[in-house]
Image (tube, helix red, strand yellow):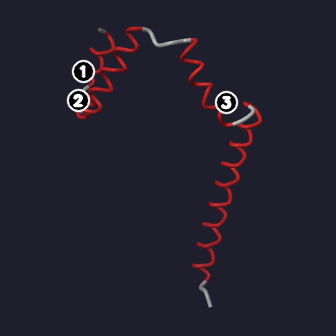
Amino acid sequence: MMSIRIKLLLSFTGMLVISLLFILLTASLYTIASTGDLQSFRDIYKVHYQINPLTEQGDSIFLELKYLAKNDPDELQNKDCCLTTILS
């Protein structure tokens, strides 16, 4: 015989899992319905960057921040460092 606490926890967990599954199912069906299939959904981002590529300045900022994130992530907490990167 299960206690009421266990029954309530199992019920709550089940409702949470089922709700999340329905949200994911709805999102995926909406994506498939709006784009046709999942492959074309991935291609949206590729097409966007082919039409609107990053500027040279944006690309250099991205590469510098990527380098900092890999080699010195604590430096990203320094606001002066990131501000000079963006402004230069």
Q: Residue at x 58, y 79 (%)?
A: 6
- Label 3 packing within 10 angstroms: few (<14), some (14-19), many (20+): some
Position of residue 70 measured from the top left corner of the image (x, y, whole percent)? 28, 33
The answer to which of 66 and 50 lies nearer the viewer is 50
Number of numbered tags placed on the structure image: 3
Picture quadrant where residue 31 is located? top right
Please, what is the three-letter code of the amino acid marked with disc 2?
A: Glu
Q: CA distance from mark 1 to mark 3?
A: 39 Å
Quarter of the rendering containing residue 79: top left
Q: Secondary structure at mark 2?
A: helix
Residue 15 x %, y %? 67, 63
Which sits earlier in the primary sequence, circle 1 or circle 3?
Answer: 3
Q: What residue does disc 3 label? A: 40
Q: Are marks 2 and 1 in contact (CB under 8 Å)?
A: yes
Figure check: 55 above or below 80: above
Dot 2 crowding, Cα within 10 Å, few <14, some 14–19, many 20+: some
**Helix, strand or loop at disc 3?**
helix
- What is the x, y in percent for residue 46? 56, 23
Give residue 75's mark.
2
The kind of residue tagged 1 is Cys
Q: Is residue 79 above or below residue 2?
A: above
Q: CB of mark 3 within 8 Å of CB of mark 2?
A: no
* Residue 81: assigned label: 1
The quarter in which the N terminus is drawn is bottom right
Front tag of 1 and 3? 3
**Front-most of 51 and 25?**
51
Give the CA separation, mark 3 to mark 2.
38 Å
Tell which residue pokes out farthest to the front in this image.
39
Give the CA separation, mark 2 to mark 1: 7 Å
The residue type indicated by label 3 comes to Ser
